[in-house]
Image (cartoon, rainbow, N blue to C red):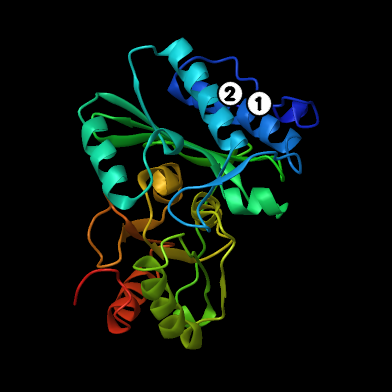
Amino acid sequence: MNPINPNSRNEREPYVVTSKGHTAVAINAAAKAGEWIKSRQGQVKELGTKTSAQDLVTEVDKGVEQMIRRLILTHYPDHAILGEEGVEPGAAAAAAALEEAREHEYLWIVDPVDGTTNFVHGFPFYCVSIALVVRGELTVGVIYDPTRDEMFVAEKGKGAYIHGIRASVSVENELAGSLLAMGFPPDREFAQPANMAGLQQLLPQIRGIRAGGSAALHLAYVAAGRVDAYWEVGLNPWDCAAGVLLVLESGGKVTDTRGRAYDIGTRHVVASNGRIHDALIASLKAGEATGYQP
């Protein structure tokens, strides 16, 4: 699979895909949305909050989600779309929206700007994330980083690619030599203590930890072999659906923090190259950092 024209990388909209199908629609939508987001960097006029002062939303988030919805529904008017900005804040609302959305045969899961806080501050680590779930199975995952002009694409059973080049997870076998990624969701009451416990437990055992502020990009980086694993307690479906498929199709492993199989409703996520997965899970359990009651 190589839907991207490698000779058009420097053009304004380099990802115009001529083939048809779900993946092509996802790539086109992510590329157009990403270009628009990048053009709005430093021009945010309205800044709002959702669950807390740390949970930001801008007119760009809302505008991009509407753009992606229109692009998808133009091709697939009978498909369902679950987008971050269309759901009330909070874990309960996200769970309720997901349960309702599960009833649809074709479900698109969209995060218009994953890393809104970074975008607002001008920190260049944010992306567009689009996934398609067909009859309950992750089938397409696309993540576009407009700052670096990197398009990550995965199709179930067909592998994952970055600009048409096959992606592969790292080959690190030991925690001691691993570079991990983690995150700090806006939820300061429940998620932050669990993630801090994981940080304290793991930091002495590994080479280093990075917290870039975008779950989707961290997952894409696991798929690309740039970090060996990523974990976070307190995620929503739109944070990780596309990235999970990228990791799986790159030869990696994704579970919840207890080691159970990933589902689109999983909120406490561990993604790795597979080689260090069991050790990472064991360490999170030992540090009581899974987000679940002991």
Is residue 264 visible in the rendered image? The answer is no
Residue 209 sits in quarter = bottom right
For this orientation, the residue located farthest to the bottom is: 204
Element at badge 1?
loop
State the residue position of label 1: 15
- Residue at 46% across / 64% down in the picture? 230
Q: Is residue 104 left or right of residue 176?
A: left
| Amino acid residing under circle 1 | Tyr
Q: Nearer the viewer, residue 59 or 217?
A: 59
Q: Is residue 228 above or below residue 86?
A: below
Give how far across and how far down residue 177 sits, in percent. Answer: 53, 79
Q: Quadrant of the C terminus?
A: bottom left
Category of crowding for the residue at label 2, using alpha-carbon neighbours closer than 10 angstroms: few (below 14), some (14–19), many (at least 20): many
| Amino acid residing under circle 2 | Asn
State the residue position of label 2: 28
Is residue 233 visible in the rendered image? The answer is yes
**Nearer-N-terminus badge (2/1):** 1
Give how far across and how far down residue 240 sits, in percent. Answer: 42, 48
- Residue at 40% across / 77% down in the picture? 198
Q: Nearer the viewer, residue 277 or 36?
A: 36
State the CA–CA distance, disc 2 to disc 1.
6 Å
Element at badge 2?
helix
The answer to whether marks 2 and 1 mark residues whose Cβ atoms lie closer than 8 Å is yes
Residue 19 sits in quarter = top right
Give how far across and how far down residue 99 sits, in percent. Answer: 21, 37
- Residue at 41% across / 56% down in the picture? 252
